[in-house]
Amino acid sequence: MAAISRDRHGRGMRRPLPSKLFKHGTRTELFHLVVEQTCEYLRSEFPELADLKWRIEEVPELDRGEALTRYTTRKASMTIVLYRIPIERLSFKGADLRAQIEQSVISAAADLIDKDPWELIHPS
């Protein structure tokens, strides 16, 4: 019996994922990096967000019939909780993942301080 080869259609071995083309490591590492950078920007630019804290969870706990959300806010502790899988999976087709993550962070921070997200994107 012949040995099973992993060579596919004469093209050689498949490249391991994530490859060198994906510079930030895993998707989870990229997600954490973008959230951290966006929160640091918001803390530095908006005094009311100086105490901003953030957490990342995979998915929210939902009650039956409850809509899936990308984030929740906790005003008492100035914390935003971002849900990685809904942000990644429910993003617009063809949209840049980094932009989707940043949008979710900015929207959550805006909800936290009762502002419109556009006020954080385009300060006056």
Image (cartoon, helix red, strand yellow):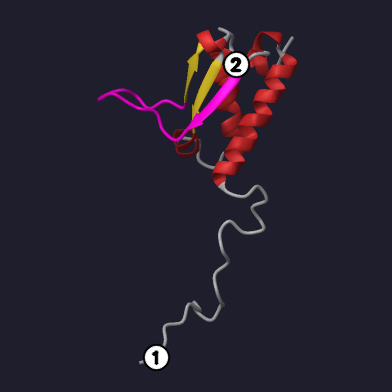
Callout 1 environment at 10 Å: few (<14), some (14 to 19), or many (20+)? few
**Residue 9: x %, y % from top left:** 50, 79
> What residue would you read off at disc 2?
117
Callout 2 environment at 10 Å: few (<14), some (14 to 19), or many (20+)? some
Which part of the image, by quadrant, shows the C terminus? Answer: top right
Left or right of residue 61, residue 19 in this image: right
Give 74 or 105, whichever is nearer the viewer: 74
Q: Earlier in the sequence, mark 2 or mark 1?
A: 1
> What residue would you read off at disc 1?
2
Left or right of residue 91, residue 2 in this image: left
Farthest residue toward the left? 64
Callout 1 secondary element? loop
Name the residue rendered at 35%, 27% in the picture: 61
Residue 36 found in image quarter: top right
Residue 118 found in image quarter: top right
Find out whether residue 108 is within the magenta segment. no
**Residue 42: x %, y % from top left:** 68, 19
Decide if residue 122 is in sight here.
Answer: yes
Name the residue rendered at 53%, 27% in the picture: 55
Give 25 or 95, whichever is nearer the viewer: 25
Q: Main secondary structure of the magenta part?
A: loop
**Amino acid bearing label 2:** Pro
Image: 84 above or below 18: above
What segment is highlighted magenta in the picture?
A: 52-70
